[in-house]
Amino acid sequence: MTSEDAAYEAVKTSLGRLAMDYVALILLHQPMGDYFAAYRGITRAYREGLTMAIGVANFYPAILANLCETVEVTPAVNKVELHPFFAQEAALENMKAYGVVPQAWGPLAEGKHGIFTDSEFTEIGDKYGKSAAQVALRWNVQRGVSIIPKSVHVERMEQNIDICDFALTDEEMAKVAAKDLEHSEIVNHDDPEFVKFVLNLH
């Protein structure tokens, strides 16, 4: 977004397309371009009741801290890559400090690292009658992370929400956390070419 007005008008355009008076949540997708102006735009929409909450996505710790220390309305949510192979514990602590709810995109690592057949996840899952994927999702939920697993298959969608009837032990949580590679293998937000790609989408 190039201006506050552009972001605000984008919200109104989206509401028109959805034929709705308001939505539950609007996210600013990337900290790129004039994102402070864009955030002011969605803040205006929030104050006018066009959305119940506003948030951000892909705002890593220093960027999120800068935003939260500067704006009048703290984002309710920060949606970032969060899964067993990229746990981002420091980012979670930073969000907690500002009262921002962490939300995971790619909570199943986009299928990388054999997450669906991982032997340790499978062993843990067998104990509860759950799949390796359900173990990975439950791990994030127990860390206080809101998850948005993606699937086009009804039975997987049903499995993805069937994770509230068991809890991982501290030892099991640690086993899952031990998979952390401490970096993303899906996207590099520090890559200038990625920034150019995203900015050229608009």
Image: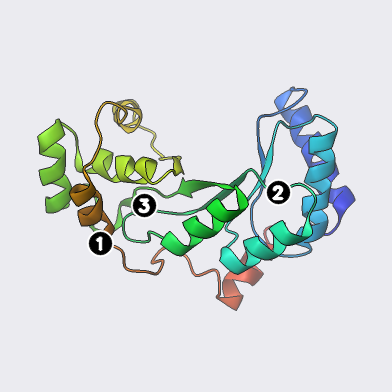
Does residue 177 appear left or right of residue 44 in this picture?
left
Foreground: disc 2 or disc 3? 2
Kind of element beneath mark 2: loop
Choose between 116 and 177: the one closer to the eye.
Answer: 177
Q: Which residue is mark 3?
A: 110
Q: Residues within 10 Å of mark 2 (few under 14, many from 20)?
A: some
Residue positioned 85% across, 32% down in the render:
48
* Chain-order first, disc 2 or disc 1: 2
Q: Position of residue 8 (x, y in %)?
A: 84, 43
Q: Residue at x 24, y 55 (%)?
A: 174
How much space separates mark 1 and mark 3, taking CA atoms? 15 Å
First in sequence: mark 2 or mark 3? 2
Q: Which residue is mark 2?
A: 74
Above or below for 66 versus 4 = below
Which residue occupies 12% across, 52% down? 119
C-alpha separation, residue under disc 2 versus residue under disc 1: 32 Å
Find disc 1 in the rendering and name its residue. 179
Identified by mark 2, the residue type is Thr
Helix, strand or loop under label 1: loop
